[in-house]
Image (cartoon, grey):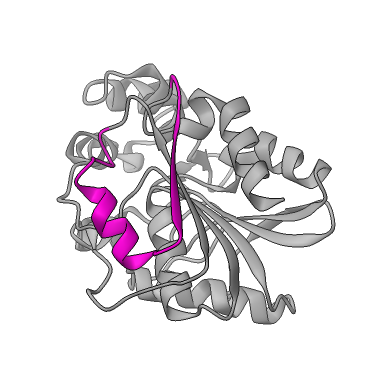
Amino acid sequence: MNNLLYAKIEGSGKPLLVLHGFLGMSDNWKTLGAKYAESGFAAHLLDLRNHGRSFHSDTFNYQAMADDIVAYCKANNLDKVDVIGHSMGGKVAMFLAVKYPELVDKLIVADISPKYYTPHHQDVMAALNAVDFSTNPSRNDVQETIEKHVTEPGVVQFLMKNVYRITPQQLGFRFNLDAFNNDEEAIGEALKESDVFNGSVLLLRGSNSNYITEEDTELIRKHFPKAVIQTVSNAGHWLHADNPTEFFDKSIDFLK
């Protein structure tokens, strides 16, 4: 089994690792990845374990995901990287920075705080678990099942990106649903009290998102003393998709 993360690499220059959120994949960042590449970066759009085209594992926690990134960097001879992580990917990026500070130069965290989050993807998980691939459903059947639990069209489309042909006759999910079902608490894990990264950090939050509250500011600064916190306007939790222009402008200003 190949335990090296799948990646799409765009451009050349300073390595910039891009880490997607829960149930996402590198493909979600294709457009922005191309823009970072045009700006002089080698954009490594990663699929995290149990997601996209990367390997499946029963182990699913932030320490393991951070270690995957270290292994990826070693295999690709990357000794100093910038990192952008959204949501779950942002947590992975934080864990990476506090555990392996020598590897991370600049860190951008998109719409997630270092605190513990209670499980809050219940409707999405119910939708995914309601799909029975053993009945050999069509893509439309899968979508109809998901729509019984999830009402936002954007979220439905986001989930449908994970439906693919395992064989010419059989559909399935790219992600490892069993691993997510086994421990729904894992994704909410907080940083440890003593975890600190003293490097440059930009934290971007969506103006319409409730993932980062005013109360979180103190906690963010405790773990990341140099953190700059900025808000992306007209954007919810998927701020890079809701307002990609402002997200890109703020991130590239920081990276340059």
Q: Position of residue 183 (x, y in %)?
A: 20, 62
Q: Position of residue 127 (x, y in %)?
A: 25, 34
Q: Position of residue 220 (x, y in %)?
A: 32, 57
Q: Is residue 193 above or below residue 212?
A: below
- The reply, left or right, for residue 75 in relation to residue 104 is right
Q: Position of residue 138 (x, y in %)?
A: 44, 27
Residue at 80 percent of width and 44 percent of height: 39
The quadrant the N terminus occupies is bottom right
Residue at 63 percent of width and 35 percent of height: 248
Q: Is residue 220 above or below residue 151?
A: below
Depth check: 78 or 107 in front? 107
Depth check: 77 or 252 in front? 252
The answer to whether one can see residue 1 in this image is no
Q: Is residue 192 above or below residue 8?
A: below
Depth check: 220 or 188 in front? 220
Residue at 66 percent of width and 52 percent of height: 255
Residues in magenta, as a range: 210-234
* Image quadrant in which you'd find residue 194: bottom left
The answer to whether one can see residue 179 in this image is yes
- The reply, left or right, for residue 166 in relation to residue 43 is left
Q: Residue furthest left?
A: 118
- The reply, left or right, for residue 32 in relation to residue 133 is right
Instruction: Check if residue 71 falls in the magenta segment.
Output: no
